[in-house]
Image (cartoon, coloured by chain):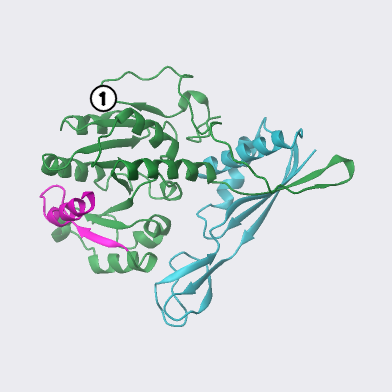
Amino acid sequence: MHELSIALGIVKIAEDETVKAKAKKVTKIELEIGELSGVELESLNFVWESAIKDSVLEFSKKEINIIKGKGKCIDCDTEFDMKFIYDTCPKCNSNFKGILQGKELRVKALEVI
Amino acid sequence: MCGTCGCGSDTNGPSILKPGEKEHVHGEHTHSHENDHHHHHDGHHTHEHSHKHKVLEIEQDILQNNEVLAARNKGYFEAKNIFALNMVSSPGSGKTSILERTLADLKDEIPFYVIEGDQQTLNDANRIDALNIPVIQINTGKGCHLESDMIFDAVKKLDIKNDAILMIENVGNLVCPSMFDLGENKRVVIISTTEGEDKPIKYPDMFHTSDVCIINKIDLLPYLNIDIDKLKNYALQVNPNLQFFEVSATTGEGMDAWYKWLKKNVN
């Protein structure tokens, strides 16, 4: 259940940034989470309430932008959508690829008061 | 709540102990990730909205704290010419047995140091200590993986000499440790022949982030229905750059190739 570590990492960032901005609390948090990031959204949502309790994020609105997985074949340069990290090139079947997007795990923005 | 291990309370935070040492008094452990490094974000854009709402564009990686300390560990290893390995697998694949055999066979040639990660007990550290190898046990409490700040603290306590190999045995778990860089030179994933050939695609993240794959318990092959080539093909589908070693920590079969690789890397 590393999602709890992730959630607490998010709380830490929110706490630090809120202090820096001399704000009191967060009203909305925007996250970017890639489909290949290794984070289960269901698990993250499950631990979220207990992770944000008594923090600046308590009562905040959470918005998650899910970023689709995309890869580029190293052998034939084809760009393709990736659902899993082990997806092979649909054109030449090569296992060698670069991941263009989908590994994101980021706090994009905070709305504070 | 302890952010290091993700446990429910402070009393379950990680403890870092040498064999024979007593459990720490709760509340004494320090988490160096708490606040002793600062990130400056000069590029903050703040937009004023009505009702004093302000939007802060943060754009910060959630794992950044872990990665910053991992980079610090990496620099330390590089400066001291320490070859650090992060050994990961499911529980019961034979991580500790591979370690024991390797240490017993090579300890006269290479200086070894070991960090053991488990949720509870000093059992693994005691097994390594019995071989007269310097070892530290990290108990993560309810935590399911090691993080770079724990390694940072453990390494300081281990006082590693130059030109050595550091073996970090992660918590037995094929999911969570994959996301947390410890600053290791190489990540070694261990799978045993009893686990089923499709494990690499069932748990792809760990195989994706590893450099080496050790297939353990090959002495049991005559009794099992596993197809090793199929297992390797699944693993290569996830990570075409994986290097394999097929071994039995029990009989010693195949260990020579693994030793050769270790010796090549420490020099």
Q: Is residue B147 magenta?
A: no
Residue sitting at 44 percent across and 36 percent down?
Answer: B149
Which residue has dot 1 on it? B19
The colour one sees for chain B in the rendered image is green
Residue sitting at 49 percent across and 43 percent down?
Answer: B68
Residue B61 position (above or below residue A56): below
Q: Is residue B257 magenta?
A: yes
The colour one sees for chain A in the rendered image is cyan
Q: Quadrant of the N terminus of chain B?
A: top right
* Front residue of B41 and A52: B41
**Residue A1 appears in view:** no
Residue at the right extreme? B50
Q: Which residues are magenta?
A: B242-267
The chain carrying label 1 is: B
Residue B76 occupies which quadrant of the picture?
Answer: top left
* Front residue of A9 and B161: B161
x, y percent for residue B111: 19, 39
Residue B64 position (above or below residue B207): above
Residue B224 position (above or below residue B262): below
